[in-house]
Image: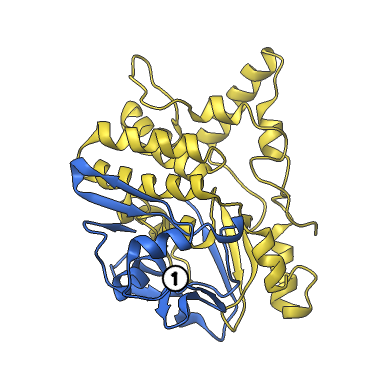
Chain colours: A yellow, B blue
Amino acid sequence: MDGAEAVREFIEAASPEHPSLVDTDHVLERTFGVVNIPNVVWIDESGTIVRPAEPGWGGPQEYPEWLASIMEERSKQAEAEGKDPMAALRAGQDRDSYADAIRDWAANGADSRFAMSPHEVIAASQPRDGGQSEAAARFELGAHAWRAGDRDAAFAHWRETHRLDPGNWTYKRQAWSLVGNEAAGGGDFGRFMQFAGPDQDWPFDGDFNTDTGRVKPGEYYPKTLEV
Amino acid sequence: MLTDTLDIDAAAFQAGTGWEIKPEGACKGEVCVPLGGGDFDARVAAERLGMSVVSDGARGLHAIGPESLGGRALTTAEAPDVVLQDLDGKDVHLSQFRGEKVVLVAWAPY
């Protein structure tokens, strides 16, 4: 499931006052350099970006019970193996205080210490070389093939996307989620099952557990500001 | 952007990539990249802008990747006028919010 139907229930339940838009074709990756979710971009009144795409949260996170128990289980298992993958994921941008930086900018505008100059914004935006441009092109071709029901073609393009741009988590998580969801039979759990289910033929070289297990502390959600 | 032919005009190139073709070259914000004159050719523009072009013969499709000028995702701090739809299928332009501060949050339910 992708497109508006993948998010409708969440948006309707939250019924926010701000607009909620559906980026079915992952336009934000190509135009703003979004590489993971959540990612936040600040744009001032004149339409100038004052902070490029970076990890950000609206406040302290609360997880639903079903997800908290999965995360706890995973931590215990990793600990028993002498690892601590959740620590690596939790390092980096501070989730609880990020919204205070936004509040500071809302109050102080260009005088906020968090507002960047155009030169700083460009320099702090995500790296992109020719290979990453190809990764983006192949992601689009893969998405087109997926919607046409040509799974093998989609997987072939997406494997190349992941190889060419291993630091782009959205391209990985989107692909893993679509396939993992099938194994789990859909639903909330399925969206998080970004790895092979029992007896499932997994078409990708990586999966969520394997790839996040390899990140160094702070790599997954890099710290880009200090409140 | 996806296209079934690379013989597209400047308007289609701009709609798909955000780069406007002017007499001085391909432009986005304050940045212009010379295209060497002559008729517009998407292949030349893509090459000058560091855009990878991938062709999928089986699907009869070409994908033009985003620019990689300067080695960064952004070549200008001017926000692109992205157009996305809301849940009702209504187009919303990012430029509609000029005059207000915008915090653009990308999220997904996974």
Q: For this view, does A213 lie left or right of residue A133?
A: right
Quarter holding the C terminus of chain A?
bottom right
B109 shown above or below A200:
below
Query: Percent position (x, y) of residue B105?
Result: 54, 61
Chain letter of the residue carrying label 1: A
Q: For this view, does A225 lie left or right of residue B47?
A: right
Tell how many labels. 1
Residue nearest the observer in this picture, A103 or A39:
A39
Query: Percent position (x, y) of residue A31?
Result: 48, 62
Q: For this view, does A104 lie left or right of residue B24?
A: right
Amino acid on which the number 1 mark rests in the picture: Pro
Residue nearest the observer in this picture, A126 or B48:
B48
Q: Which quadrant would residue A126 be assigned to in this image?
A: bottom right
Q: Residue at x 63, y 59 (%)?
A: A125
Query: Percent position (x, y) of residue B34?
Result: 49, 73
Residue nearest the observer in this picture, A41 or A190:
A41
Q: For this view, does A90 lie left or right of residue A155?
A: right
Residue that numbered label 1 is attached to: A19
Can residue A18 be seen in this snapshot? yes
Q: Residue at x 44, y 70 (%)?
A: A19
A78 shown above or below A132:
above
A75 shown above or below A13:
above
Quarter holding the N terminus of chain A?
top left
Query: Going by the picture, which residue comes out furthest to the bottom?
Result: B99
Q: What secondary structure is marked by label 1?
A: loop
Query: Percent position (x, y) of residue B83?
Result: 38, 71
